């Protein structure tokens, strides 16, 4: 039982990170129908900037997080402007290939700038271990879960209550109608990239703190898993991405604890396939009828 | 067969034989060393992979991002088959062993294509893409954990049966088969699904059956490509058949032009040879590669050839015509 509770907390920890990264995928997909393959690399760069801010500049924790999020938001907007905007009316597959290209480019850029050897991420959060009965919870875990939940609530409020958030929802629902309503679509898309990339960077920092490492290809697997989480919850739906992230994190932790470490990824994929076969648009997705 | 078609076949055949002779002479005179021959063999294998992926991605128009999985199935099953055959003491000529192993690899991969395609092809677009990624990752993880084929350490000791001579002709045969498929009744049915699924269903085409057919055929040829890869490398490891390899093949197909087989061939050649050429400045190799990809997509989103095919005879005819026009203009000036 204790082991189970312990694993439950670990699952929440990993799941909240996946959820943060998945939000970026789902927001971008919702608004321009593009699988942003470069998102995993954005989280990797976010982790690197946090690493630099913490080790070279010795900034306080909040400044480390904030600087990494702000820099990545700017880079995210720049990527959209340079690589994706010229292709907005091109076939969707071309945009997808461009996203893959950007992903490869950022990965190799990181290889050249930071070199391939993994760096040790310092413990940026104050470290204490709380004991409840026989369960141990480190403060890092609590901070990770807390920060993720805080930003998710913030995002939810932003999307539902503010004018910009409403514009985002409008553009993702019907771009042409949104233009007719006087919404600046380009600015809204840039804002989406900024928010998504900032959350991705935060996810990257938390991920690197949890696994103590930073390396150029660290974005690939969590990126893929976060993408799966987004699809599982119903891509384009923000609560779906959060739900999917927690499910994937939980399933992964539980399989690693009780079944097998080597098969964990396969089981994650198998669950995705089974869900999609029965509910082709994801857990929270709505079925749209095809019209002739 | 009308006269024009005959001429086209003849010209293509001459070009194929001529190209082969060029390579033959280069290899015999050692102008091309083993390193370059290796690149040529890998290029042939990638051509097969790209053309087979084009059946699903180009003809059928579906996003299939798990081609490496079928390649892995073909590679492992054919390698196990040929190893069992050779261990069993059957001393067949190498080419016969290779062809048998290729057929086994192709059929096993094709069966898996059928099994995976039947339930998944009702998904559309991105959802299909992610499910195919999922299946190919599951296949890879299976081979990592599967003891009899060496697990994560890889499968060693496969007899090397592939050389440039046989891989060249096998590639030609596969190319011929896929070209023929594209022009057959079945191929046209598959293409009509890409153009408009509802309209083709209304025209009486059993769309589900043809979708599964396209998927299985693509898997079959991917299995053939995988068999060649196994018997060329003589060593297989599961990590080779990861997600990035599938993406790499998909990039080749999109860059060549979805639905254009000649485009696939050219882009497979370029994208296999280019990274090797850039090897001299190794550190920046993939950086340049990815930049080329982005720039290419921004300026030519439909790929090199779009959906049209490059035709040698049409090319030659246009050359002759241009010459004639030039001559007649020149003649006009002289008189």
Image (cartoon, coloured by chain):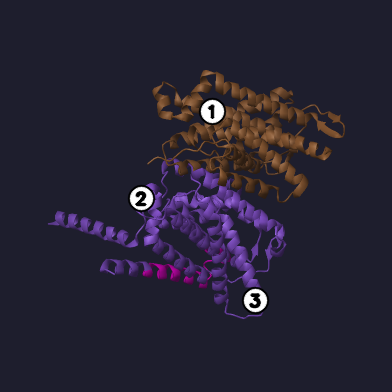
Chain colours: A brown, B purple
> In the drawing, does residue B229 fall left or right of residue B13?
right
Q: Residue at x 71, y 64 (%)?
A: B148
What secondary structure prevails in the magenta region? helix
Instruction: Please give the label number shown on residue A82.
Output: none
Q: Disc 3 marks which residue?
A: B86
Determine the chain carrying the residue at label 1.
Answer: A
Structural distance between the alpha carbons of marks 3 and 1: 59 Å
- CB under 8 Å between callouts 3 and 1? no
Answer few, some or many: residues within 10 Å of disc 3's Cα (few below 14, many 20 plus, some between 14 and 19). some
Location of residue A230 in the rendering, given as x and y in whole percent from the top left corner: 59, 37
Q: Is residue A283 above or below residue B154?
A: above
Structural distance between the alpha carbons of marks 1 and 2: 41 Å
B51 and A112: which is toward the camera: B51
Residues marked 2 and 3, same chain: yes
In the image, farthest residue toward the left: B335
Location of residue B18 in the rendering, given as x and y in whole percent from the top left corner: 40, 69
What range of the chain is rendered magenta?
A: B13-41
Determine the chain carrying the residue at label 3.
Answer: B
Location of residue B132 in the rendering, given as x and y in whole percent from the top left corner: 56, 50
> In the drawing, does residue A149 fall left or right of residue B21?
right
Q: Quick one: label 2 or label 3, which is nearer the N terminus?
A: 3
Q: Disc 1 marks which residue?
A: A192
Q: Quadrant of residue A118?
A: top right
Structural distance between the alpha carbons of marks 2 and 3: 52 Å
Q: Residue at x 36, y 55 (%)?
A: B204
B111 and A224: which is toward the camera: B111
SS at badge 3? helix
Determine the chain carrying the residue at label 2.
Answer: B
- CB under 8 Å between callouts 1 and 2? no
Instruction: Please give the label number shown on residue B202.
Output: 2
């Amino acid at each position: 039982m204790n082991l189970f509770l312990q694993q439950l907390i670990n699952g929440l920890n990993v799941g909240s990170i996946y959820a943060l990264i998945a939000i970026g995928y789902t927001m971008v997909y919702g608004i321009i129908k593009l699988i942003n393959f470069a998102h995993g690399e954005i989280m990797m760069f976010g982790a690197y900037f946090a690493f630099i801010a913490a080790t070279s500049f010795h900034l306080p924790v909040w400044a480390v997080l904030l600087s990494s999020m702000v820099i990545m938001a700017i880079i995210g907007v720049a990527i959209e402007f340079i690589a994706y905007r010229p292709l907005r009316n091109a076939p969707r597959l071309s945009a997808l290939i461009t996203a893959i290209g950007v992903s490869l480019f950022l990965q190799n850029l990181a290889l050249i700038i930071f070199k391939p050897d993994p760096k040790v991420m310092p413990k940026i959060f104050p470290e204490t271990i709380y004991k409840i009965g026989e369960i141990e919870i480190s403060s890092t875990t609590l901070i990770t879960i807390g920060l993720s939940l805080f930003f998710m609530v913030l995002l939810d409020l932003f999307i539902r209550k503010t004018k910009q958030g409403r514009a985002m929802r409008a553009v993702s629902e019907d771009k042409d109608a949104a233009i007719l309503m006087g919404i600046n679509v380009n600015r809204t898309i840039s804002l989406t990239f900024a928010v998504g990339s900032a959350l991705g960077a935060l996810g990257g920092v938390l991920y690197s703190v949890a696994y103590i490492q930073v390396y150029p290809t660290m974005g690939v697997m969590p990126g893929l898993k976060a993408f799966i989480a987004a699809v599982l919850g119903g891509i384009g739906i923000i609560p779906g991405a959060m739900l999917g992230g927690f499910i994937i994190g939980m399933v992964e932790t539980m399989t690693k604890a009780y079944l097998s470490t080597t098969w964990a990824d396969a089981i994650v994929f198998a669950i995705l396939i089974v869900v999609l076969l029965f509910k082709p648009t994801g857990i929270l997705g709505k079925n749209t009828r095809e019209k002739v | 067969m009308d006269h024009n078609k005959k001429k086209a076949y003849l010209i293509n055949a001459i070009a194929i034989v001529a190209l082969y002779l060029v390579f033959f002479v280069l290899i015999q005179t050692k102008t091309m060393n083993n390193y370059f021959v290796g690149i040529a063999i890998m290029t042939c294998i990638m051509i097969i992979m790209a053309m087979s992926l084009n059946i699903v991605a180009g003809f059928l128009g579906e996003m299939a991002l798990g081609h490496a999985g079928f390649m892995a199935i073909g590679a492992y099953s054919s390698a196990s088959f040929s190893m069992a055959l050779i261990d069993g003491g059957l001393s067949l000529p190498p080419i016969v062993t290779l062809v048998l192993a290729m057929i086994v690899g192709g059929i096993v991969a094709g069966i898996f294509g059928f099994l995976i395609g039947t339930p998944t092809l009702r998904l559309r677009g991105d959802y299909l893409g992610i499910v195919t990624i999922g299946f190919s990752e599951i296949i890879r993880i299976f081979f990592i954990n599967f003891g009899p084929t060496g697990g994560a350490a890889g499968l060693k000791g496969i007899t090397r049966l592939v050389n440039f001579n046989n891989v060249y002709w096998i590639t030609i045969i596969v190319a011929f088969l896929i070209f023929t498929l594209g022009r057959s009744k079945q191929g046209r049915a598959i293409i009509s699904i890409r153009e408009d699924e509802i309209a083709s269903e209304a025209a009486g085409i059993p769309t589900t059956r043809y979708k599964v057919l396209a998927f299985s055929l693509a898997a079959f040829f991917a299995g053939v490509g995988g068999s060649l890869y196994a018997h060329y490398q003589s060593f297989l490891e599961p990590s080779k058949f990861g997600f990035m390899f599938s993406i790499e093949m998909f990039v080749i197909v999109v860059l060549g032009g979805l639905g254009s087989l000649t485009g696939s061939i050219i882009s497979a050649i370029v994208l296999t040879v280019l990274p090797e050429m850039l090897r001299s400045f190794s550190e920046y190799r993939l950086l340049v590669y990815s930049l080329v990809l982005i720039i290419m997509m921004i300026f030519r989103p439909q790929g090199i050839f779009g959906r049209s095919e490059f035709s040698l005879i049409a090319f030659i005819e246009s050359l002759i015509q241009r010459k004639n026009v030039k001559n007649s203009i020149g003649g006009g000036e002289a008189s």
